[in-house]
Image (cartoon, rainbow, N blue to C red):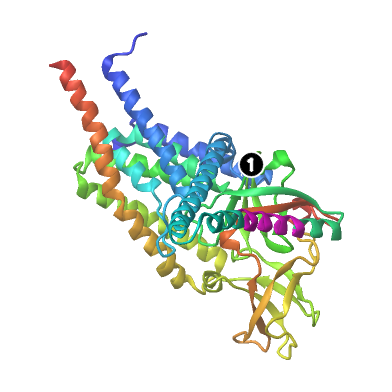
């Protein structure tokens, strides 16, 4: 044991661990929420991750086309070449339609909220050990992204940025129990806090808490951000009420909410880097 | 200063391991690249680092573990260098144990791999308990961490056999040159 402790290898090991921990402490102090070693590694591995993500997308598209081709060839034998061509055109049309719909929604959000400043971003990684649909986006502090920036898809809130390196950022979604959003139900105007727990998160739900026992919120109600706190702008859609459940030990009830964005399947999102009334991370105490 | 043939071989071998680690990191962290089986995800870097450290010893094990950890942390922009610390320690400990206490075989790889995976899953599970509260903890253990542990553990022999093949190939080359 003494020989092990006095060995060169053990000294190197201790030095490396100490350096990593010092970097983590420095990041905590500097409020960047991203360890120094992680930021440095992000410079090297970020581009690789982006290339890998792009290639995977290309291979996946090729696979879809390949399957379509096989199906269409069968139809050509059975029917005729014209129908096959029309089907290919239809696939392109559907893809274009989807793209336009997504951009139209963003345009609508932009028109309704001229104070919003957006950065478009792609999901380049989903960390394997994260159980709550967290994602890494290909935009970082170089593009003006900072900690606590809201992330949206269309008019729907997805989550918020919790860690930023110069070239990428980490997002915690609404399905992460550590995320809570001040919100209200649009018909009844009842206010509460949207959060989740491990059980609800696994089912893909959040809950609007602190509703009174005689709440008028019913199934189908739409829950939006209230803007209180200055982290999220007002009136981003969070989701739809699925059911009302009693809160154990109190007279209040919770509304179980299903986020409208398909959080686990998103590939492209927008980050709101600035909006009227936004608080800086220092002001919000994070 | 000229490098001896043996040193060149070691450098080539470790460069190959570094490339393997980068490749495995991309495979693990790129969405849609490695199959997710019923919500279970493969933590491929853990068995990879353990198996490499078993053949290369504690010092090389800790450096390659550090590389793997940084690659993993970079995929998540983690606030703390959790994976870098964990995999550096895993690489060092596996290297020390095999050079001092354990034999280098598939059973040892399974033992060290399962211990590292279990420790990692336990740490992440407890961390999720801290942020997510007590409710649904068992569900997340049974629905995510245990299946992911089993899935990752099942791939440990693949890494061991591959690393052993690279290592023995390199050693055989050395013997051939000596003869």
Q: Quadrant of residue B20?
A: top left
Q: Quadrant of residue A253?
A: bottom right
Nearer-the-camera pick, B82 or A272: A272
x, y (%) of residue A212?
73, 86
x, y (%) of residue B107?
20, 50
Q: Residue furthest bottom?
A: A214
Q: In the picture provided, is B134 more to the left or to the right than B101?
A: right
Residue beneath the point at 31% across and 51% down: B155
Viewer can see residue A286: no
The stretch of residues the image draws in magenta is A92-105
Total marks placed: 1
Q: Is residue A221 magenta?
A: no
Q: In the picture provided, is A278 more to the left or to the right than A179?
A: right
Q: Residue furthest top?
A: B1
Looking at the image, residue A45 lies above or below residue A220: above
Neighbour tally class for label 1: few under 14, some 14-19, many 20 plus, Cα within 10 Å: many
Q: Residue furthest front?
A: A80
Residue beneath the point at 33% across and 60% down: B150
At mark 1, the secondary structure is loop
The C terminus of chain A lies in quadrant:
bottom right
x, y (%) of residue B24?
41, 42
Nearer-the-camera pick, A200 or A261: A261
Residue beneath the point at 53% across and 53% down: A126
- Report which residue position mark 1 lands on: A165
Looking at the image, residue B142 lies above or below residue B86: below
The N terminus of chain A lies in quadrant:
top left
x, y (%) of residue A168?
63, 43
């Amino acid at each position: 044991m003494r020989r092990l402790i006095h060995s060169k290898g053990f000294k190197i090991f201790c030095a490396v661990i100490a350096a990593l921990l010092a970097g983590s402490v420095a990041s905590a102090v500097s409020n960047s929420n991203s360890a120094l070693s992680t930021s440095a590694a992000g410079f090297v591995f970020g581009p690789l991750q982006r290339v890998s993500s792009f290639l995977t997308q290309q291979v996946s598209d090729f696979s879809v086309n390949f399957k379509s081709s096989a199906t269409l060839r069968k139809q050509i034998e059975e029917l005729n070449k014209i129908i096959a061509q029309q089907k290919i055109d239809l696939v392109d049309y559907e893809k274009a339609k989807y793209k336009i719909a997504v951009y139209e929604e963003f345009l609508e959000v932009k028109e309704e909220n001229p104070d919003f400043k957006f950065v478009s971003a792609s999901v380049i990684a989903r960390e394997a050990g994260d159980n709550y649909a967290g994602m890494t986006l290909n935009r970082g502090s170089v593009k003006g992204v900072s900690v606590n920036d809201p992330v949206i898809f269309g008019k729907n809130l997805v989550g918020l940025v919790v860690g930023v390196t110069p070239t990428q950022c980490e997002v915690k979604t609404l399905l992460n129990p550590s995320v809570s959003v001040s919100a209200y139900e649009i018909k009844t105007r009842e206010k509460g806090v949207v959060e989740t727990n491990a059980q609800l998160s696994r089912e893909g739900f959040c809950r609007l808490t602190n509703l009174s026992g005689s709440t008028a919120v019913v199934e189908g109600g739409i829950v939006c951000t209230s803007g209180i706190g200055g982290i999220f702008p007002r009136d981003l859609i969070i989701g739809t009420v699925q059911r009302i459940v009693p809160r154990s030990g109190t007279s209040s009830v919770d509304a179980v909410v299903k986020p409208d964005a398909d959080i686990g399947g998103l590939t492209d999102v927008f980050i709101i880097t600035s909006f009227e009334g936004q608080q800086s991370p220092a002001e919000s105490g994070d | 200063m000229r490098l001896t043939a043996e040193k060149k071989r070691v450098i080539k071998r470790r460069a190959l391991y570094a490339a393997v680690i980068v490749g495995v990191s991309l495979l693990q962290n790129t969405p849609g690249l490695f199959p997710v089986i019923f919500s279970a995800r493969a933590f491929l870097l853990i068995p990879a680092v353990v198996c490499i450290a078993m053949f290369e010893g504690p010092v090389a094990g800790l450096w390659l573990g550090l590389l793997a950890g940084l690659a993993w942390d970079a995929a998540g922009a983690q606030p703390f260098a959790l994976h870098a610390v964990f995999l550096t320690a895993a690489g060092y400990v596996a290297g020390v144990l095999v050079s001092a206490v354990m034999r280098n075989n598939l059973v040892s790889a399974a033992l060290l791999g399962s211990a590292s995976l279990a420790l990692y899953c336990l740490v992440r599970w407890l961390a999720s308990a801290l942020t997510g509260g007590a409710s649904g903890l068992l569900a997340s253990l049974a629905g995510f961490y245990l299946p992911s542990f089993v899935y990752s553990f099942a791939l440990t022999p693949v890494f061991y056999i591959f690393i052993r093949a690279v290592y023995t190939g390199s050693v055989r080359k050395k013997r051939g040159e000596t003869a």
